[in-house]
Image (cartoon, rainbow, N blue to C red):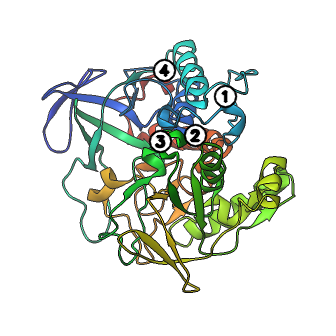
Amino acid sequence: MDVTTPGDTPVQTGVRAGGDGVGRVGVVVIGAGQAGLSSAYHLLRRGLEAERDVVVLDANPAPGGAWLHRWPALTFDAAHALHDLPGLPLGTPDPKEPAADVVSRYYGAYERTFDLPVHRPVSVLAVEPEEGPAGSSGHGDGPLRVTTTAGTWIADAVISATGTWDRPYWPYYRGRDVFAGRQLHTHDYRSAAEFEGQRVLVVGGGTSAVQFVLQLHEAGAAPVWSTRRPPSFTRRAFDPEWGREVEAEVNARTAAGLPPASVVSVTGLSLTAQYRAGIDAGILVSRGPLSELREHSAVFADGSVEPVDAVLWATGFRAALDHLAPLRLREPGGGILMDGVHVVKEPRLLLVGYGASASTLGASRAGRAAAVAAVTRLRAGAGRATAGNLA
């Protein structure tokens, strides 16, 4: 079906974009991790047709989302809990199999089972109003233009599920530019064996930092751990009630337009038997806040100095939302004002995997909510050209 956009650009429903081509769909889902796959599943379950009404754009070369890039030593039993995607249980993987392999296989099977219209590798460069750049006062009712490395799609709704992996956070510390040793982020970590015989400063207070300290010690390195605050270990089991409490606390920030806090800053670190042993052995003991780096050493807030050969920044990630910059969504507080999965400033955009929905459980639920919202928008008439299956 031929249609004409407000900008008089001829497009055709159900045409796959490519090169200079333009495709017209009802919903573009950006990202094929837990949130993106859940969104796509629920969109198809509600009557939308793959390719004609929905496409999923994934920057990765294969299924797996951010898990595809996890270090080989991260086994499934040591990873954050992976919750089932809707309609297809994960089953019981080998706990000692690399998490990247488990999740890539599971996500791939999921895509095939439900014939999800995933296009890869496709990187999204920009999402902007088809009627032109967003004005200072707000956003229109026309479609959104999604510009990618594989052409352009025009969509009545966009579900952005890009997560955080592509935006590692490197904090600024005095002397970081003069330190002579190797510096790397969790994003680039592959194996503790690379650091055998070295003194490695691990900066960060989350689960990854704790695991790195233990792995480095086991590999024959000498880890030095630095955290801004005393590590917060807890014996509380992460049950559904606690999960709801954590979600509510994280959501309170995004509902106020503030950047989402990390989940671990709310939950603390689960005190496993392995972590308890590491504490008792004097391995998991923080030196406190880092003050500065020198050419071959680290200076801590208490004035003590430790020689170090490398720095591993386990300092987390920020939401990967650069492709949404043309929509001007940021609030003065630095975050995006949210109402659940709805972006308050931009009704054509649903945001999942942001804030509390960054966990795999939250992502699955948010994917369903985003799909319901997108279909509701199409049924209301914003997607007249592509909502034929919804009547």
Q: Secondary structure at mark 3?
A: helix
**Distance from the alpha carbon under mark 3 to that under mark 2:** 38 Å
Residue under numbered circle 2: 367
**Distance from the alpha carbon under mark 1 to that under mark 4:** 13 Å
Q: Secondary structure at mark 2?
A: helix
Residue under numbered circle 4: 116
Q: Please name the amino acid that badge 4 sits on.
A: Leu
Q: Are marks 1 and 2 in contact (CB under 8 Å)?
A: yes
Q: Residue shown at 40%/49% (left/top)?
A: 348
Q: Earlier in the sequence, mark 1 or mark 3?
A: 1
Q: Give the label, 3 or 4, closer to the camera.
A: 3
Q: Earlier in the sequence, mark 3 or mark 4?
A: 4
Residue under numbered circle 1: 86
Q: Please name the amino acid that badge 2 sits on.
A: Gly
**Distance from the alpha carbon under mark 1 to that under mark 3:** 39 Å
Q: Is residue 170 above or below residue 186?
A: below
* Closer-to-camera residue (282/292): 282
Q: Are marks 1 and 4 in contact (CB under 8 Å)?
A: no
Q: Position of residue 355 (x, y in %)?
A: 57, 57
